[in-house]
Amino acid sequence: MIIRTPKFWNKKGLISNLLLPISFFWIFFSKLKSKFSKSINSPLPVICIGNISIGGSGKTPLTREISKLLKDRGYNTCILTKGYKGKAKGPILVNNNLYTVKEIGDEPLMLNKYDQVCVSKDRYSGVNFINEQTNADVIIMDDGMQNPYITKDFTIGVFDGKYGIQNGRIIPAGPLRETMEDGVKKIDIFFINGNDR
């Protein structure tokens, strides 16, 4: 799902400058959360497909393609997602005949046409659910790069080639969820969606 981003995120202008102090608080509390959070190893390998900035960058279509790539090579995959805008907390295994967009969001229903999907607001509960309730031997986590509670075995960072990182500032002064320096350390492969402008 594409989220419309404010126009002032495109440059370092007046509004962005005024919001910078709030960005420093965001960075501080994010680093504090990461420092005191215990990362737990999943029983199954976890491939995370995420991004440094908020908004649509093409994570979900790439998640589907990575899943297909692995399935073609004989792996049983399960996609783990929070079910953006859905009410269900989960963990639940998606069934297009049982659940609606209001319950689990539109992306899990779309992905379920190609693969088994687990919706869970709590990622760790979702990981355990997939391990215990499915035949999966690989978990593909759609988003969650900034989640400090699950150890990722491999992380793919997705960037929109048209917008990149815009003004390069942290929320709310810019679109970044974390600093580029911190984000780059987590990424094993960079994927640029579309032409790199």
Image: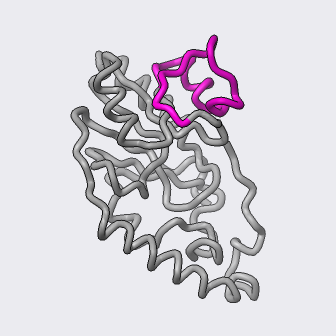
| Image location of residue 73, percent across then percent down | 30, 19
Among the 4 quarters of the image, the one containing residue 31: bottom left
Residue in the image at 35% along x and 48% along y: 155
- Let me know if residue 29 appears in the view: yes
Instruction: Point out the stretch of residues depicted in magenta.
Output: 89-117
Q: Give whichever of 36, 113 is nearer the camera.
A: 36
| Image location of residue 131, percent across then percent down | 29, 26
Question: Is 100 one of the magenta-colored residues?
Answer: yes
Residue in the image at 65% along x and 29% along y: 103
For the C terminus, the image quarter is bottom right
Does residue 52 sit above or below 188 in this rendering?
Answer: below
Residue that protrudes farthest toward the top in the picture: 97
Residue in the image at 52% along x and 18% along y: 114
Does residue 166 sit above or below 42 in this rendering?
Answer: below
| Image location of residue 91, percent across then percent down | 46, 31
Question: Is residue 7 left or right of 149 when viewed as pictured?
Answer: right
Q: Give whichever of 15, 195 is nearer the camera.
A: 15
Q: Give whichever of 173, 192 is nearer the camera.
A: 173
Question: Is residue 140 left or right of 6 when viewed as pictured?
Answer: left
For the N terminus, the image quarter is top right
Residue in the image at 34% along x and 35% along y: 127
